[in-house]
Amino acid sequence: MDEMEEELKCPVCGSFFREPIILPCSHNICLACARNILVQTPDTESPQSSRASGSDYDYLDLDKMSLYSEADSGYGSYGGFVSLPTTPCQKSPNGVRVFPPGPAPHPQQQQQQPPAQQAGCLLAPIPRNACITCPQCHRSLVLDERGLRGFPRNRVLEGVVERYRQGRAAALKCQLCERNPREAAIMCEQCDVLYCEPCRMRCHPPRGPLAKHRLVPPAQGRVGPGRRAAPRKTSTCAEHELENLSMYCVQCKAPVCYQCLEEGKHGTHEVKALGAVWKLHKGQLSQALNGLSDRASEAKEFLVQLRNTVQHIQENSVEFEACLVAQCDALIDALNRRKAQLLACVNKEHEHKLKVVRDQISHCTVKLRQTTGLMEYCLEVIKENDPSGFLQISDALIRRVLMTENQWGKGTLTPRMTSDFDLTLDSAPLLQTIHQLDFVQMKVPSAPMLQLEECCTENNSATLSWKQPPLSTIAVDGYILELDDGDGGHFREVYVGTETICTVDGLHYNSTYKSRVKAFNASGVGQYSKTLIMHTSHAGLPPAEMQSVAWFAFDAASAHPDIILSNDNLTVTCNSYDDRVALGGVAFSRGVHYWEMTLDRYDNHPDPAFGVARADVLKDVMLGKDDKAWAMYVDNNRSWFMHNNSHTNRTDGGITKGTTIGVLLDFTRRILIFLINDEQQGPVAFEGLEGAFYPAISLNRNVQVTLHTGLPIPDFYTPGEVDPAAHMC
């Protein structure tokens, strides 16, 4: 609760808020303090005269008005409303300079003043063109004819301050002990009395009429120490004192009454039920607090890490100094003078590292304390039962919580200094070069950092990006990227070079890969980065079907030179009368996959072939002529299955222009099936398939085919029973 105390104190006087008002910038200030920091602007420089449109903030030219001085970082006055700068100014505990009230008026002048001005400075009228500058964010605005009464009263903050002060001043003591009251152990809800254990046994026995009373812990029975929960107060309208606030104006962001809607400026505005908006804003504030709470937890862990870094720096410093002294003592007397210089260099680096880390600890500690204080304050505000008062500050608190959370952004919780000493003494040079002896870097590189926002997968390819840690100054000669086999096997090197981004093709479809990278230089190989898990599958069908679908096109790089591709590599033909092969752009090794090809042109003579193939299939013969392809070739009357130049299963039924050929590859049953116009063509074409297969086709210039991918499995086909995890992304 001590952290919350900063939220409950005025930034001007440094004391707990008294009659706080809410400025348009969402900050709070005591009403009396607001009166003290008012300044008056000339008519010619009044922002009201040059303001084009109304807004939440009215900014002033502080340089022209001399309201702010770099010399004293305080607030001045203009026009004589507040005492002139020649009068000594007071400084609040929070560093805001407050000018004292001006000299008392002459008695005759005082008699001529209205009674409201004689009552005190708080009741005195506000001079025309008066403005006020927020002591926290330094935003300035001009007051209207209502003066300080135009700012809403923060009743919720008053209630929180009162509960906090009573909680600190009072303790839950037994109310029946005659001398030296003991701490209360129980409270009777019916009697509304706090009992210690001896007094409860003596005065409130658990029998007779008292047996039906409900005993609860003291903290549960009371809201704050020493007082019961107050019933919800019914707030009344400031302009219509006899009307209760029951609606909320969305445009003005203020509670209103029914008379305001009928007679006032809110008649044409959108309004909502006060209770509904109250609950909505409470939920939004609670949701925003969840994110801020996570940042506070991370900050606490980060502080532990920084303190451990200090210890490691101390340990490494002692170890390094010992090694350095041992090397220098082994040399001849000529090294003694140089040894002192080198030790001074190490101590300087030691102090520099400690200073950087300690400064970061101090900064992060202050920020965490402020964050924790805001959290506790918001939690107290959420307990407020007055919807009108809560809604006065809910928008501001939500903005402050979100803004504070954003301040814990990237880099805030990153160490600014490492604990390692990148200093190595080179004792190889000859004696005459001792005076040139200096530290050289002989350390392996730090572990690279994977840039998750740039890493992605598409079909059977994975792109990975990484960088060196921002605090690392060790030279890097190159990087080594490693991936496993997609099935939890051993890692293998897939890239070695100086680039910091790499795309790996030819991965298994619908597989989970683990990747890591390490850096190397002349001194050796550094540690691995964190392991990144990537998926090469795209969920296409509902989870109940446990399937995936793939989108791909023909691969121009691997196709025969006579192949002609168009329509984003989805349409294929050939400029040769001989059969030429084209492969798809993805390889399948697990799961169930289905794609179709439509005949755009066919003259009833050629025999196009459709199927799957290995990456090294022959590209200048019909598909299936070698042992690298499994295909169905078909004419206008019948079809055959062919593998390794062996023809099987002749089936009636051919193709014409517009025919659709489907290919179904099922790794769960390890089979290949062909379809013509949505009907299975012949029996199962091939069984026992295992490994990686590319979609493939062979054709000549008399045939043109368009590929269709991303298709679900045909309805007639039911995949075999497999492990569901094999198809999950």
Image (tube, rainbow, N blue to C red):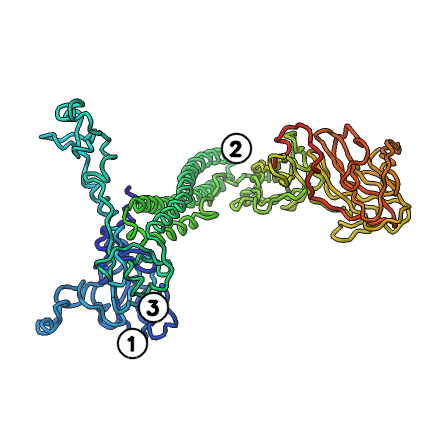
Mark seen at residue 43: 1
Where residue 374 appears, as percent x and y from the top left, is 33, 47
Position of 65 with respect to 584 (left or right) is left
Foreground: disc 2 or disc 1: 1
Mark seen at residue 330: 2
Give whichever of 70, 443 is nearer the camera.
70
Query: Earlier along the polypeptide chain: callout 1 or callout 3?
Result: 1
Amino acid marked by disc 2: Ala
In the picture, which quadrant includes the N terminus? top left
Where residue 569 appears, as percent x and y from the top left, is 76, 50
Amino acid marked by disc 3: Leu
Disc 2 versus disc 1: distance between alpha carbons?
Answer: 83 Å
Query: Earlier along the polypeptide chain: callout 2 or callout 1?
Result: 1
Q: Residue at x 20, y 68 (%)?
A: 125
Give whichever of 35, 541 is nearer the camera.
541
> Circle 2 — which element?
helix
Give whichever of 320, 81 is nearer the camera.
81
- Look at the picture and state if 323 lies above or below 112: above
> Circle 1 — which element?
helix
Q: Residue at x 84, y 50 (%)?
A: 601
- Tell me the residue that label 3 is attached to: 62
Disc 1 versus disc 3: distance between alpha carbons?
Answer: 15 Å
Query: Earlier along the polypeptide chain: callout 3 or callout 2?
Result: 3
Amino acid marked by disc 1: Asp
